[in-house]
Image (cartoon, helix red, strand yellow):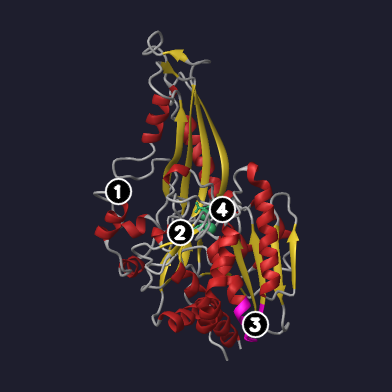
């Protein structure tokens, strides 16, 4: 029987070329100008799933972008793995900070990736990681080693809130029935410290608008006499954290799950070097909520961050003006057991209540999602653990991540199965940033590890 390692070795150039072709299509779900490219990407994923051995693949229409669904059912009595991933990507801006164009993939060496890394938008998040599953399936079918049934559900709206996926799931519960959900859309600690993501944060995303006078004003003639929406917005935002960096919205922490002393001690054992962390980001110090470590701040604690702020004059030179309006986009990362709709409401009420006389405030909710924590004693987790032991020679460390894949909580609710997050990216892969990349080593390691998961999951289900 051929090992995954030797199969990868024999096909490595093609595995890279195919991914590079997929990365060339700018499937930016947030920008309607790229609609045709998003649709083209769905077609490309369909073709590749067929080639990799799925019996049937369909492009399922939704109110938004389509979902690519494929399956290979070998025996109804065997377990079924449902693979989820996304073919859409984040916008590449700011373009000028890319060292090579975002949709012209190139392989370059980096300090952490001496074997080379593919630089392109979506290389790690999530085309590269999703495609590992396609190639793992190819290996298993080509070498007659697929031990169980497999279903693929690859969506095109993850980066904009997965609205159509919720719609699709509620209408296709039977079709999507499975024993475990497998996702590679997260990261791991490092190449020699494998980890499995056991938690994702929830999210509440809002946009705020502060309106002052009915038109832009001369800042000399009116300055000092009317509320400046930008000054006011800055002040309101600043007041959302206190001197300990706690969030000041009344009721915000009411439902936050507090970890036990033991759980926090266990977390503190996770390998982490503060100096390296600071150095990698070129900061002289980390910053955050008092009483919590960096690893806690970015995983088990809720946050509030401004993602964008604008208003007034930002062109060349100076223009003396008091703008009529100021805006900001704000995200709150949530933890178990916060309810995102409740948090959105609390934010709205609070933000409106702190607006001084002289301005009007509007809060527009965008989207949200629930946090997720997967147990480490489930069949799926234990199978994944064994898979990593096989290919990394080490037991993976369970680690809660700060990122969000809002649909995962819905999977559990609607499909009643656990999700296993086998991520192979590194924090330094710059997802959502300029120069996103994915290590060639990581790509192949994923393709090697995934079949082991199928093997152990099937074995352990017996
Ligand atoms: N793959 C990421 C989420 C992620 C990355 C989780 C790394 C854990 C580790 C996903 O594509 C993403 O970017 N999610 C968004 C949420 C979405 C609603 C826009 C996020 O976390 O900002
Ligand atoms: Mn992703
Ligand atoms: Mn993303």
SS type, badge 3:
helix
Mark 2 or 4, which is nearer the eye?
2
Label 1 element class: loop
Vertical comparison of 15 with 106: above or below: below
Q: Residues within 10 Å of mark 4 (few under 14, many from 20)?
A: many
Residue annotated with mark 1:
287
Image quadrant where one finds the C terminus:
bottom right
Q: Name the image quarter holding residue 402.
A: bottom left
Image position, residue 366 (x, y; %): 57, 42
Q: Nearer the viewer, residue 46 or 203?
A: 46
Which x, y percent locates residue 103?
Answer: 54, 52
Residue indicated by mark 4: 89
Residue closest to the far top: 221
Q: Quadrant of the N terminus?
A: bottom right
Residue indicated by mark 3: 142
- The answer to whether any part of residue 199 appears in the image is yes
Number of numbered markers: 4
Query: Would you call the spot at circle 2 few (<14 residues within 10 Å), some (14-19), or many (20 or more)?
Result: many
139 in the magenta segment: yes
Residue 232 lies in quadrant: top left
- Measured in 3D between alpha carbons, the distance from the residue under mark 2 to the one under mark 4, in whole angstroms, is 13 Å
Q: Which mark sits nearer the N-terminus, 3 or 1?
A: 3
Distance (Cα) linking label 4 and label 1: 29 Å
Tell me if residue 418 can be seen.
no
Magenta residues span 138-149
Residue for point 31% across, 68% down: 271
Question: Residue beneath label 2, please?
Answer: 437
């Amino acid at each position: 029987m051929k090992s995954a390692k030797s199969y990868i070795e024999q096909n490595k150039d093609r595995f890279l070329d195919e991914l590079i072709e997929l990365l060339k299509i700018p499937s930016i779900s947030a920008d309607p100008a790229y609609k045709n490219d998003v649709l083209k990407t769905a077609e490309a994923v369909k073709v590749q799933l067929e080639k990799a051995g799925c019996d049937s693949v369909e492009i399922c229409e939704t109110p938004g972008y389509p979902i690519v669904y494929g399956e290979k059912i070998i025996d109804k009595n065997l377990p079924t793995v449902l693979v989820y991933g996304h073919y859409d990507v984040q916008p590449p801006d700011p373009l000028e900070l890319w060292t090579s164009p975002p949709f012209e993939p190139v392989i370059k060496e980096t300090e952490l990736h001496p074997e080379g890394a593919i630089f392109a938008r979506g290389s790690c998040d999530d085309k590269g990681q999703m495609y590992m599953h396609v190639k793992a399936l190819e290996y298993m079918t080509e070498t007659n080693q697929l031990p169980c049934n497999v279903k693929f559900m690859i969506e095109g709206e993850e980066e904009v809130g997965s609205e159509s996926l919720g719609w699709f799931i509620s209408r296709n519960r039977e079709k999507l029935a499975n024993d475990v959900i497998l996702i590679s859309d997260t990261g791991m600690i490092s190449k020699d410290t494998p980890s499995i993501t056991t938690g994702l944060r929830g999210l509440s995303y809002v946009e705020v608008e502060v309106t002052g006078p009915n038109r832009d004003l001369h800042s000399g003639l009116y300055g000092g006499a009317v509320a400046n929406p930008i000054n006011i917005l800055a002040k309101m935002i600043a007041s959302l954290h206190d001197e300990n960096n706690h969030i000041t919205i009344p009721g915000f922490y009411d439902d936050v799950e507090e970890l036990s002393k033991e759980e926090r001690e266990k977390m503190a054992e996770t390998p982490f070097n503060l100096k390296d962390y600071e150095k990698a980001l070129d900061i002289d110090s980390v910053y955050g909520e008092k009483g919590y470590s960096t690893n806690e701040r970015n995983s088990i604690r809720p946050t509030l961050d401004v993602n964008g702020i604008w208003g007034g004059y930002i062109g060349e030179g100076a223009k003396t003006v008091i703008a009529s309006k100021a805006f900001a986009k704000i995200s709150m990362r949530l933890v178990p057991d916060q309810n995102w709709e409740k948090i959105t409401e609390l934010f709205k009420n609070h933000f409106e209540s702190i607006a001084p006389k002289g301005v009007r405030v509007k809060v527009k909710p965008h989207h949200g999602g629930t946090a997720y924590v997967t147990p480490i004693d489930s069949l799926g987790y234990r199978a994944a653990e064994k898979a990593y032991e096989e290919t990394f020679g080490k037991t993976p460390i369970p680690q809660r991540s700060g990122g969000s894949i809002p649909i995962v909580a819905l999977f559990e609710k609607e499909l009643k199965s656990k999700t296993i997050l086998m991520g192979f990216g590194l924090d330094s892969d710059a997802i959502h940033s300029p120069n996103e990349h994915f290590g060639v080593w990581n790509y192949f390691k994923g393709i090697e590890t995934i079949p082991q998961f199928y093997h152990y999951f099937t074995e352990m289900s017996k």
